[in-house]
Image: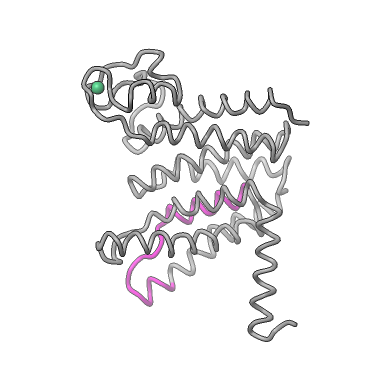
């Protein structure tokens, strides 16, 4: 059962969690402690007052600039907070108040962090991906997708793309995907299971080719520049985690349409 009060609570909880995710996104790739020191301006190092830490409102009230040194505060902060809030809200309606809601929200948080870190640094920290493989598989013994689906998803996500990339590397002589991508896909497989991880992989390849390729062409940096593939995996995995049924239905229709087109089905 869902209610307006419950929805409001989940949204605000998401804003607060999103505020913490910003700390993780900033500090994890820099090897800094997540707990200490308290939030400070990354430009002048002044510790933030409590009201500057209020999600969304803090950034808006300050007009996106530090109160003392007037340095621009990245719009990434309010964006991450708003997205986390909206995903918590959407999760409430998609899963209700169930144990699966908690698992999918934790998964969504991990995807948000990986999305942002890969986009900025082109790395996918093991602290999240490898821990995610273990946690996702362990939870599957109690909750969907079940341990068999999770194990198969983990292998399909982690091993199959690795083989494809290995062939690509042998043929083209350069890397299409990195080890971090395989570990992240294994994590997605452990949480979402088979066949959802497979569909997530296909969607992320399409997104990576269309958006990533387009952006590279526009920026004229040539196609040798690495595409932050983890960012696209995160977007695809979130879509699959939240809209499991429609995504699988569309995938089935696309496969049938393809088989009909090549004359293997009628
Ligand atoms: Zn400052």
Give the colour scheme shown: one colour
**Residue 234 locus on image (x, y percent):** 50, 49
Q: Is residue 2 placed above or below 118 in the rendered structure?
A: above
Q: Residue at x 65, y 50 (%)?
A: 243
What is the tally of numbered marks visible in this picture?
0
**Residue at 66 percent of width and 72 percent of height:** 255
Q: In percent of the image, x 41 and y 61: which residue is there?
A: 177
Q: Quadrant of the C terminus?
A: bottom right
Residue 7, image quadrant: top right
Residue 67 vs residue 200, the one in the foreground: 67
Q: Which residues are magenta?
A: 167-191
Q: Quadrant of residue 97?
A: top right
Determine if the magenta segment contains residue 101: no
Image quadrant holding the N terminus, namely: top right
Quadrant in which residue 250 is drawn: bottom right
Ligand 1 quarter of the rendering: top left
Residue 120 vs residue 167: left or right?
Answer: left
Q: Tell me residue 63's x, y (percent).
A: 33, 25
In this rendering, the answer to whether 18 lies above or below 239 is: above
Foreground residue among 22 and 34: 22
């Amino acid at each position: 059962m869902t209610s307006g009060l419950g929805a409001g609570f989940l949204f605000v909880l998401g804003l607060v969690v999103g505020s913490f995710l910003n700390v993780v996104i900033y500090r994890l790739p820099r090897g800094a402690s997540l707990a200490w020191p308290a939030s400070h301006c990354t430009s002048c190092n002044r510790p933030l007052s409590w009201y500057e830490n209020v999600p969304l409102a803090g950034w808006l009230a300050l007009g996106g600039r530090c109160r003392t040194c007037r340095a621009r505060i990245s719009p990434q902060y309010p964006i991450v907070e708003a997205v986390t809030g909206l995903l918590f809200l959407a999760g409430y309606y998609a899963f209700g108040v169930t144990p699966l809601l908690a698992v999918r929200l934790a998964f969504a948080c991990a995807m948000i962090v990986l999305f942002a870190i890969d986009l900025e640094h082109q790395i996918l920290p093991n602290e999240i991906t490898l821990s995610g493989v273990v946690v996702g598989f362990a939870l599957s013994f109690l909750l969907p997708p079940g341990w068999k689906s999770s194990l198969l998803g983990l292998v399909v996500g982690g091993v199959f793309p690795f083989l494809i990339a290995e062939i690509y590397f042998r043929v083209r002589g350069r890397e299409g995907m990195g080890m971090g991508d395989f570990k992240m896909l294994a994590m997605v497989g452990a949480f979402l299971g088979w066949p959802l991880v497979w569909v997530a992989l296909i969607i992320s390849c399409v997104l990576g080719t269309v958006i990533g390729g387009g952006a590279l062409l526009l920026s004229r940096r040539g196609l040798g520049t690495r595409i932050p593939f983890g960012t696209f995996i995160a977007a695809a995995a979130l879509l699959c985690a939240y809209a499991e049924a429609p995504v699988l239905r569309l995938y089935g229709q696309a496969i049938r349409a393809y088989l009909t087109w090549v004359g293997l089905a009628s």
